[in-house]
């Protein structure tokens, strides 16, 4: 993997991902298992301002009801439109089109963040974790899901010589363009390097096999998965892993307000105008269209 300031982005503009993959894709089990993991990992006491990185069409957003406000960040405007249709326009949700490697927020803003099914699109995982750390407060919770290269199916395929890459080595495997599976040890090392202390690990989707999914009702598989998930603390052999970590340092309370920062020059705050935000330092203007703050390129 190379290191650049502008790593490539897996573009979901115009994608029917939510419909094809979730609604018509027979993934009630995976969705239910993720709901359980989030319920167990989210802080009981809730919080003020949660950042959902790569929120997509907002599939998980209603699960963050313990937070007073949720900022949905995604690179794809059309995914955000779908999220807006699902969740509505209100003070509770803030929709932001931007690149997760260069988030348009002031430092130390959020008391929580999630990144579910997004890290696997990152060619520079450490970079995006460091950027996440920048916008979080000390003590903030971060729930990260990643695709695990050391999963049982990959291990069996490798042992049977039906797969050439080794599931036990630390380097990521790019199984399709901008789709990576990671080794758990490597992800934990990146989290540590970015300034997070790992608190809990849950393995998710233990039973992701066509045969089982056809034979056993999704509800039963979800209940079985819920029982197996805590073993993630000791070993991780599932295709999906959820990690709860916390930004190191004494907790600082969030003011609950979103303060934007110019992604072009780093100045904050930005000045609101009729249909855009203006940067008083570099003059860049960022559109606000139908309730979506658009930081993909300046006007
Ligand atoms: C597989 S979807 C997951 C969506 C949602 N988190 C879920 O679990 O349903 C990945 C999402 O990450 C977004 N994404 C990928 N790279 C991104 C980047 N560099 N910055 C912001 N969003 C990105 C995509 O636009 C897409 O909506």
Image: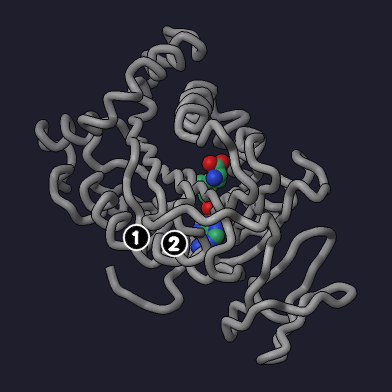
* Residue at the (79%, 43%) spot, across then down: 85
* Residue at the (10%, 33%) spot, across then down: 159
Q: Quadrant of the N terminus?
A: bottom left
Q: Position of residue 144 (x, y in %)?
A: 42, 46
Is residue 81 visible in the rendered image? The answer is: yes
Mark 2 within 8 Å of ligand 1, using the beta carbon: no
In terms of secondary structure, where does tag 2 sit?
helix
- How far, Cα to Cα, is label 1 from label 2? 7 Å
30, above or below 225, in the image: below
Image disc number at residue 195: 1
191, above or below 153, in the image: below
Q: Position of residue 72 (x, y in %)?
A: 64, 52
Q: Residues within 10 Å of mark 1 (few under 14, many from 20)?
A: some
**Residue that sits furthest to the bottom in the current view:** 282
Q: Quadrant of residue 99?
A: bottom right
Q: Quadrant of residue 125?
A: bottom left
* Residue at the (52%, 71%) spot, across then down: 102
Q: Position of residue 221 (x, y in %)?
A: 43, 14
267 on left or right of 278: left
Q: Quadrant of residue 265?
A: bottom right
171 on left or right of 160: right
Mark 1 within 8 Å of ligand 1, using the beta carbon: no
Q: Position of residue 150 (x, y in %)?
A: 22, 39
**Contact check, label 1 and label 2, Cβ < 8 Å:** yes
Q: Which residue is mark 2?
A: 133
Foreground of the two, 119 or 175: 119
Q: Quadrant of the C terminus?
A: bottom right
**Residue that sits furthest to the right in the current view:** 274
244, above or below 110, in the image: above
Is residue 59 visible in the rendered image? The answer is: no
Q: Residues within 10 Å of mark 2 (few under 14, many from 20)?
A: many
In terms of secondary structure, where does tag 1 sit?
loop
């Amino acid at each position: 993997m190379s290191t650049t300031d502008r790593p490539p982005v897996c573009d979901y503009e115009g994608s029917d991902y939510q419909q094809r993959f979730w609604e018509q894709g027979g993934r009630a089990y995976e969705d239910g298992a993720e709901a359980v993991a989030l319920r167990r990992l989210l802080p009981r006491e809730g919080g003020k301002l949660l950042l959902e990185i790569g929120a997509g069409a907002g599939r998980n957003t209603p699960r963050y009801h313990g937070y007073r406000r949720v900022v949905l960040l995604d690179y794809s405007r059309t995914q955000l439109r779908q999220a807006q249709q699902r969740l509505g326009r209100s003070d509770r949700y803030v929709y932001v089109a931007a690149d997760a490697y260069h988030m348009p927020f002031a430092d130390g803003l959020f008391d929580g963040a999630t990144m579910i099914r997004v890290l696997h699109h990152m060619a520079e995982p450490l970079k995006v974790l460091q950027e996440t750390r920048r916008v979080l407060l000390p003590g903030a919770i971060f729930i990260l899901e990643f695709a695990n290269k050391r999963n049982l199916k990959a291990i069996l395929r490798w042992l049977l010589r039906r797969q050439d890459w080794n599931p036990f080595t630390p380097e990521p495997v790019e199984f399709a363009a901008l789709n990576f599976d990671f080794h758990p040890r490597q992800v934990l090392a990146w989290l540590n390097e970015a300034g997070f202390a790992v608190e809990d690990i849950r393995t998710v989707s233990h039973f992701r096999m066509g045969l089982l999914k056809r034979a056993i009702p999704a509800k039963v598989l979800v209940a079985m998965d819920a029982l197996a998930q805590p073993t993630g603390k000791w070993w991780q052999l599932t295709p999906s892993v959820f990690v709860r970590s916390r930004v190191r340092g004494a907790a600082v309370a969030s003011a609950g307000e979103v303060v934007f920062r110019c992604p072009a020059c780093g100045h904050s705050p930005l000045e609101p105008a009729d249909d855009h935000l203006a940067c008083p330092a570099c003059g860049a203007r960022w559109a606000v269209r139908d309730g979506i703050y658009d930081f993909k390129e300046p006007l």
